[in-house]
Amino acid sequence: MELPEGRSVKMTMELLQGAIDIHVHPGPHLKSSPRRLNPFQTAIEARDAGMRAIVLKDVFEMSNGTAWLVNQQVEDFQVFGGLMLNTIYGGMNPRAFKTAIYYGDGAKYLDFGAHSTYYQASKEGRIVNGKFVPLSELYPKFREEELSRCIRIPLEGDPDPALDEILTLLAENPHIYMDTGHVSPEEAMRLIELKAKYGYKKIVVSSSVAKVSTVSQLKEMARKGAFIEFTFGAYTAANMIPLTHYYVEKEYTSIDEGLSGGPEGGIAAVARTISEIGPKHCIMSTDFGRYALSTPVEGLRQFIACMLDLGIGPDDIRLMVKTNPEKLLGLEK
């Protein structure tokens, strides 16, 4: 492969103009996992870099409340938030979602959970005597308090009443998009299929799903109308260290999904997959905020630089960092 001409730091900064990062994790957080910046600092840095908006993710709170606060103080910029249905909310909780719709600036997304999906939580664990052991085997209390509340999407039959109410609310509020969260590829596909029954429109297949799906699965998800998210955080060096600081209990610190190294293929695999799926179906974001990483703005610039180096053209990058997020958030001109 020949490296494309015209690559420069200036070009990466130009591609940040009007960009939107839909996956940012600023503070607050647990003391065991400090954040790089607070939400106000994050918004100001993004605005000053020429970006248009950011979307806040928070595994402990409905982040549209934080978004409301930031939007009161930071001018000429937009911050959005929403709800992640983690076990702190009891998992599949329609009441929490119903409240989030009207809280603060109102939820812009409904996420089916990060570490609190059964698919993810059942795979998290630690190395014990040289062998990976799931937390659910190490700690019976983890099974009782976490796995029992974790979200599972039924692959067959009708959704249970809780999921039915949530999907109905999504359909009734078309300005809110669904984020699949850290479910399995099969569960993500089921959520996409159910939109024909319920009528909700906007779906993001989270980077955690994209990372473990086949290209054929991702193509099918895209064909059925979902955006496929790729986060830079899933492919950075910091991904090879224990990341899970969702749990207050220090003994639950774990290596995500039993990973002992980076995702197969690394960052180059992202460029190849985007080329196969088609940039019009993809969104680039960061999942940055952890103190060990650079700031979200610099993370997005680095992601842009990597894609340029791997042969993804400026127009396609602009589509993934600006145009597609605008469609998702209803910000098209």
Image (tube, rainbow, N blue to C red):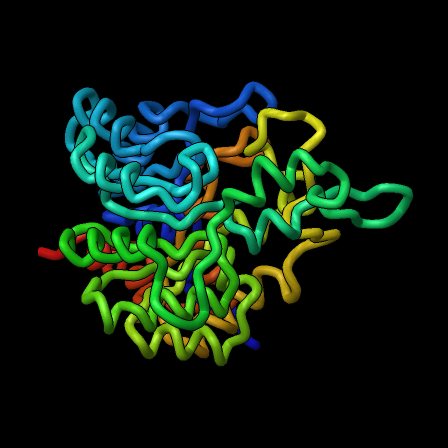
Residue drawn 23% across and 48% down? 18
Please report the residue visible at 49 percent of the width from the left and 53 percent of the height from the top.
182
253 relative to 305, above or below:
above
Relative to 222, 291 lies left or right: right
Q: Nearer the viewer, residue 128 or 172?
A: 172
Residue farthest right in this picture: 129
Q: Provide residue 69's location: percent of width, then percent of height.
A: 23, 22
Residue 2 vertical position relative to residue 99 in the rendered view, above or below: below
- Specify the quadrant of the image occupied by residue 265: bottom right
76 sits to left or right of 154: left
Examine the rendered structure and indicate whether residue 46 appears above or below residue 248.
below
**Whole-percent x and y of residue 106?**
19, 37
Q: Quadrant of the N terminus?
A: bottom right
Quarter of the image for residue 159 reads bottom left
Q: Quadrant of the C terminus?
A: bottom left
- At x 24%, y 73%, the residue is 196
- The answer to which of 4 and 198 lies nearer the viewer is 198
Question: Is residue 150 something that shows in the picture?
Answer: yes
Task: Identify which residue is drawn at 27% across, 51% down.
Answer: 166
